[in-house]
Amino acid sequence: MFQSKKRKELEGVIRQIRVDLANNYKDNALENLNTLKQETEAANASGALKPKEVDELKKLIEEFDHDIKNFKRTY
């Protein structure tokens, strides 16, 4: 599947959120999630993302929101 240039940039933020959650860094994950939300909305408004990519990102954002709300420290 081909991805837009902007989507590839957002993949870096997504990877960082996953790392933050895996390492119990809730504050960093929340900060990166907010960045992802803002960047997704800006890219959507400018037309830098395809509608399918926007839908995938919004679904992923919802999953991260859920993960962060149910976040429990493991130490």
Image (tube, rainbow, N blue to C red):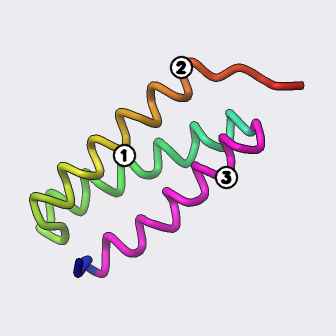
Q: Nearer the viewer, mark 2 or mark 1?
A: 2
- Whichever of labels 2 and 3 marks the residue nearer the N terminus, that label is 3
How packed is label 3: few (under 14 Cα within 10 Å), some, or many (20 or more)?
Answer: some
Q: Is residue 39 above or below residue 50?
A: above
How packed is label 2: few (under 14 Cα within 10 Å), some, or many (20 or more)?
Answer: few
Q: Nearer the viewer, mark 1 or mark 3?
A: 3
Question: What's the magenta region?
Answer: 5-24
Give the amino acid at mark 1.
Answer: Lys
Name the residue: 14% across, 57% down: 45
Q: Position of residue 51 (x, y in %)?
A: 9, 59
Name the residue: 61% across, 57% down: 16
Q: Is residue 74 left or right of residue 41?
A: right
- The residue tagged 2 is 69
Q: Which mark is residue 37?
A: 1
Q: Which mark is residue 74?
A: none
Q: Residue furthest right?
A: 75
Where the C terminus falls, by quadrant? Answer: top right
Helix, strand or loop at mark 1: helix
- Whichever of labels 1 and 3 marks the residue nearer the N terminus, that label is 3
Helix, strand or loop at mark 2: helix
Q: Is residue 44 above or below residue 32?
A: below
- Whichever of labels 2 and 1 marks the residue nearer the N terminus, that label is 1
